[in-house]
Image (cartoon, coloured by chain):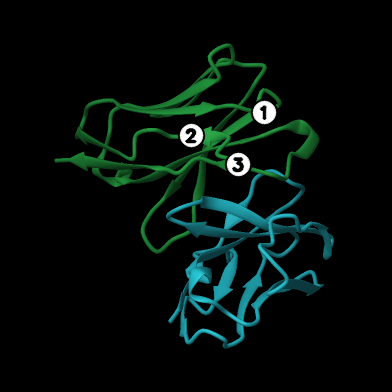
Amino acid sequence: DQQVKQNSPSLSVQEGRISILNCDYTNSMFDYFLWYKKYPAEGPTFLISISSIKDKNEDGRFTVFLNKSAKHLSLHIVPSQPGDSAVYFCAASSSSNDYKLSFGAGTTVTVRA
Amino acid sequence: DAGVIQSPRHEVTEMGQEVTLRCKPISGHNSLFWYRQTMMRGLELLIYFNNNVPIDDSGMPEDRFSAKMPNASFSTLKIQPSEPRDSAVYFCASSLGTVGKHFGDGTRLSIL
């Protein structure tokens, strides 16, 4: 039972343009959300997170938006760079089990030069 | 600083054999996690240790899987006997507390 869903398996974007990755969740107990980035043959690395008390968090070129009523979050990367080509995982946890991350299936982003 | 170190990076073995995956967490981290990544199920938590004690092993698929953490700097995940459906990438992660997980580069396991 996938509690975190990334419905777009892949995304292709031109260098310099915006990448928008989407994530939906079903568990209303989730109150902390994260995005991880993964290169081939490497482990996931933490990118950015957001708590449910906020609706936006920004870190440089990366912004995460949270819409609690829709149980939806998105990651915006602007401008996109070739080094952003990777698999991006959305993950969520609840404060009652904050060690237990539920991951989405991932979205492969390809940034075209 | 060294990150989470996993060995081996790749393992190919025949079904029925015992497989042991190893993990060295980041020094000072008190939480350790084993994850499995497959095409069908994505990344799923197998087991979580805190201060070397298993806290949640509900994700361990079946009795063929076992994990130990004899000290703060070493953990193993063992599969005995191995089956082709165990083929996956196994990640170890560590953290100070439960958030801020640092992942190793994984072990790609192929069971023939």
- Specify the chain shown as cyan: B
Q: Which residue is found at the position 53% from the left and 14% from the top?
A: A70
Q: Which mark is residue A30?
A: 1
Q: Chain of mark 1?
A: A
Q: Secondary structure at mark 3?
A: strand
- B106 shown above or below A112: below
Between discs 2 and 3, the one toward the N terminus? 2
The chain drawn in green is: A
Q: Is residue B28 left or right of residue A109?
A: right
Query: Marks 2/3: CA distance?
Result: 10 Å
Earlier residue among tags 1 and 2 = 2
In this view, A19 is above or below B63: above
Question: Helix or strand or loop: what does disc 2 sit on?
Answer: strand
Image coords of residue B109 (percent x, y) = 48, 74
* Residue shown at 44% from the left, 24% from the top: A74
- Kind of residue at disc 2: Lys
The disc labelled 3 sits on which kind of residue? Ser
Percent position of residue A58, x then y: 49, 23
Q: Residue at x 42, y 55 (%)?
A: B39
User: Quarter of the image holding residue B68?
Assistant: bottom right
The residue shown at (34%, 40%) is A9
Quadrant containing the N terminus of chain B in the rendered view? bottom right
Q: Which residue is mark 3?
A: A102
Q: Residues within 10 Å of mark 3 (few under 14, many from 20)?
A: many
- Same chain, marks 1 and 3? yes
Assign a secondary structure to mark 1.
loop
Left or right: B100, with A55 as reference point: right
Q: Residues within 10 Å of mark 1 (few under 14, many from 20)?
A: many
